[in-house]
Image: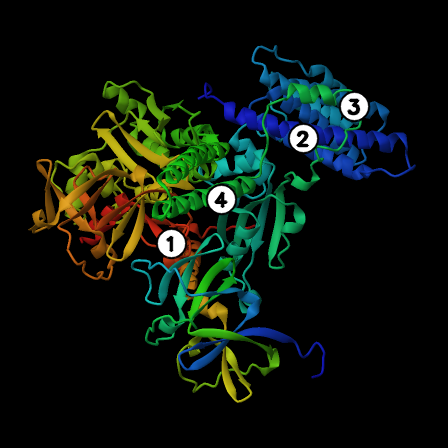
Amino acid sequence: MSSMSNEGFTQEFLEEAKEHLRSIHRHLLALENSILHEGQGEHDIPRYEAIDQLFRSFHTLKGLSGMIGLQTAAQLSHSLETVLLSIQKTRIEANEDVLQALFEGTEKLEAVIASLTNPDAPELNVDEQVQRLAELLPSLEQTEKVSKEAAPAGAAAPEGMFLTMETFLQDVLGDYPDIRASLNDRDYPVLIDAALKGRYLWLCTFTPTSEWTKQGINVAQIRQELSKTGTLIKAVPLVSGSGVQFSFLITTQKPVDSLTFPYLQCILLLPGRSLPEEPPISKPRTPASSSDATDRSFQTNLVRVDMKRLDALVQMVGDLVIQRSVLADRLKDLSGIKNNERRDLTQTMAQMDRTMRHLRDAVLRTRMVPLSDVFNQMPLAVRDLARSTGKDVQLILEGADTEIDKALIDRLFEPLLHLVRNAVTHGLEDPKERLELGKPERGRLVLRGRPEGDHIVVEVSDDGRGIDREKVVRRARAMGITDHDHSATDSEIVDILCHPGFSTQETADLMSGRGVGMDVVRRAAARMNGALSLSSEVGSGATFSLRLPLSLVILDAVLVRCENEMFAIPQGLLDEVVQIDLHRIVQAESGELYPFQEDALAIIRLAKLFGLPPAEPERSPRSYCYGLIGTLSDRRAALLVDRLIGLREIVVRPVADPLITCPGVSGAAELGNGQVVLILNPNELLEDAKRKRI
Amino acid sequence: MPKGSGFKMETYILFFVGSSSYAINTTWVQQVEMVQNITRVPNAALFVEGITYLRGQMVPVVNLRTLFGLDKIDTSIRSRLIVVRLHGRVVGLQVDSAREFIRIQEEQILPPPEDLHGPGVEYLKGIVSLEDRLILVIELDNLLNREEKKALLNSVDDLEKKEVTPGERKSSHV
C-alpha cells in the first residue's frame, strides 16, 4: 500500500500549505511590528491574534504534513507550534531572538514543502532549526521534549501529529471514546477531507428534556438545522446513566458564531480556516525577504473557483442550449421566405450549433476533476478493511486521471466504497484459502476508470471467489424474487443482487454477500443517470462497473411520446430503439412478447407502468410503435412508447421534493416553451416493472 | 386604529377553494402565477397535480381542491398557483382564485370552533371574521409537512431504536 500514488493529495496539500504559509507571513510581520513598536501606533492585527493565528496555522500544517507523510515538515511545524504555545502561555517572551528563530524556521518549512514539487530534490534536514527552536523553550519543557524524542530511536512522531488515521482520531477525539468508536471507514475519508479543506470540526451534544420537547425541538429538527449549517458526519445516540444524549459530529466552513444553538452544547474539535480571513490577493504584500521566493516555488497554474460560479455558468449555457433549439424549431416552421434566405439562416444556425457545442464542452470541462479525488480516499478504507477481515489486499488504481464532473464525483464516493467493501469483505478469500486454491496469497483489487464516449466507466474488480450464479438464482427462486432458470445472465444476477428483499437477507455465505446493500449502489447510479453492471467468473473474481455520464447537467436525450405525455430519455442509457409492429406482439403467460432477432423481447408498456390516461384515438391508427432497449436489459425487454419525437439537448434539473419523486424518473427538463418533460431511466423502469410484475 | 406592539398587522393572501375563502401569511408566499404548463407525475399522490418549472427550479404542484377532498374542476382564467417557500422547500398550491391581500392582526385570529366542519379544516391555524366574511387561516406547516413528518419520524425512530438496543446499553458519557 505504501506504493500508492498520492498525487491528488499532494496537489491539494500544496494549495493548502501555500495559503497557510501566506497567513504565517502576514502574522509574523504583524508580530514583528508589535514587538518593535511596542505600545506605539496602530497595528492592523493585535498581537494576541497574530500569535493565535500563527499557532493555528502551524498546527494545521503539522497535521497536513503528517497526513501526506512529509515528516520533516511535520516535525518542524511541531517545533514552531510549541514555541508559539509557550508564548501564548507566557512561559517565554516574544523577543527579537524568538522572532528570528520563527522566521528562519518558517523559511525552512517553506523550502521543505516546496521540495515536494521537485521529485529530484535532496531531502532537506531540519535538525538545525528544530534544535534552535527547542533552545528557546523554558528548560523544563526542553528536557521533556528531548527525552520524549530520544526514547524511540530515529523518526519518532512528534506528539499530536496526525501520522495515521489512528493518531488523527486520538488527537481529535481522544477525549470522546464513544464517538470515536462509532466512526467507521466511511467516515474517515470525510474527516480527512474536512481537515485538508480547513473545515471546522465540531462535536455538538443535545440532551432532550421535556422543556425542549415542548418547544418542538427534537433530534430530527436538530439534524435539519445542523445540515443547513454544515456537513453532518455522524449522529450518535448515547445512554448516560438514566438519560439519553445525542451527539452530532459536524464540519462547518464558518467559524465559531455559526454554531450557537441554545439547545446544543458545541465543542470545537479541530479549528479550521475561516475563508474571509484570507488575505485578499490584490493587497500589496509588505516586503518580506522570502515571500516572493515562496510564491515562485509554489506556482501551480491553478485557479480556485467557487462551484457556485461554475454552476451559474452551466445554467446559462443550458438556457442558451434551450433557446437555440427553440430558435431551430421556429426556423423550421418559418414560411414565406425565399430559398436562399432560408439557406443562409440554416447555415448560420449550423455554425451556431457548432460553437454552442464547443462552448458547452468547454464550460463542462471547467467542472471536471480527476477520479483520483475519490480513488485516493480508498487506500485508507481498504487498509482498515483488510486489517479487520484478515485479508491481504493489493489495491491497484488505474486511470485515476480520468475526469468526471465535480457534482458527480461527490456522489460517487459512497457507492464506490460500498463496492470496495464488498469486494474486500466477501469477494477476496483470506490468504490461507487463496494459497490452497493455487492463487497468489495477496488478493488483487483494481479500481479502474476509463472514458467511453461521452460516458465514463468506473470498475471495481477483484480476483476473489466470483459470484456463484446457480446458488444466487436458486436462493432467489426460493424467495420468490425471480423465475429465472440457471442460465441467468450477469444482468439478471445484478437485478437479483440489487433486489431490496434479497439484499437484506443473510446471504453472506451463499453468494459472497454481494447482495448486502447493493440496492443502494444501484439507486445511487440511477440517480446519476448511470447504470450498474457485473461480469463475474466463479472462482476467478468479479467486476462491477458503474457507467456514468460525463456531466449531470446537459445531456443528449431522445424525446418520446406516450399517450398524451412527452418524456426524455438520456441517449447514453439507450442501447437500441426498435420499431415494433403492434400486430406481432404475442400474449404469453408471463406477459407480452415480441419476436426479435431469433429471440423474444418482453414488452413493457410505459403507459401501463405509469397509468397514463389514454389519448384521443388518432384518425388513422398506427400499426407500429417503438421499443426502447436499455443498456442493461440484455436485449430481453423493451419499453414500449407510441412515438419518437427526436433527439434534443436537455438541461437536467433535479426533482427532489418527495411529492414528485417517482421510480425510474431521474429528473426533469424544461423545453424552452415552459413545458416540462420527465427524464426517464429505462433500466430502472424495466427493473421497476419486473418488480411490480407488470 | 391604535398603533403599538400589541397590534401587529400581518399581510395575508386571500384565496378561494370551492365555496370557502382561505388566507395564508404572505411571509411564506414567493409569487403567484397563472396555472399553466403542469406536467403530470406518474404514481404521485392524488392531490399532486404534477410538476412545473419556476425560476430555474422544478416545483411540485399541490391541488388544494383535491387535498381538501373536493371534486377536481378544469382550470380557468381565474385559477392561480400560489408559490410558497417553507423550510427551504418550494411548493405551488393550485387554488380556484386568488386576487386580494388583506391585513390581519394576530389577535383577530380565533381558534377554530371544535364543531367546524368542511374542506381543509384540519390544516387551519384559526378563523377570522372580516366584514361578514368568514376566512379560514391556513397553517402552512400543517399543509406541507404531513408527508415530510412521516419521513422524519422514521429517521428519529431509527435513532431512538438504536439507543434502546440492549447491546448498546453500555455506560456512556459525553
Q: Residue at x 35, y 76 (%)?
A: B70
Its colouring scheme is rainbow
Identify residue for label 2: A20
What amino acid does circle 2 point to? His
Identify residue for label 4: A315
The answer to which image quadrant residue A12 occupies is top right
Q: CA distance from mark 2 to mark 1?
A: 48 Å
Image coords of residue A142 (percent x, y): 74, 24
N-terminal label among 2 and 1? 2
What amino acid does circle 1 point to? Val
Report the quarter where the C terminus of chain A lies. Answer: bottom left
Image coords of residue A41 (percent x, y): 91, 38
* Crowdedness near tag 2: few (<14), some (14–19) or many (≥20) residues, C-alpha within 10 Å: many
Using residue A274 as the reference point, say whether residue B74 is left or right of it.
left
> Is there any visible trace of residue A243 in the rendered image?
no
Q: Secondary structure at mark 1?
A: strand
Q: CA distance from mark 4 to mark 1?
A: 16 Å
Identify residue for label 3: A288
The answer to which image quadrant residue A306 occupies is top right
Q: Secondary structure at mark 3?
A: loop
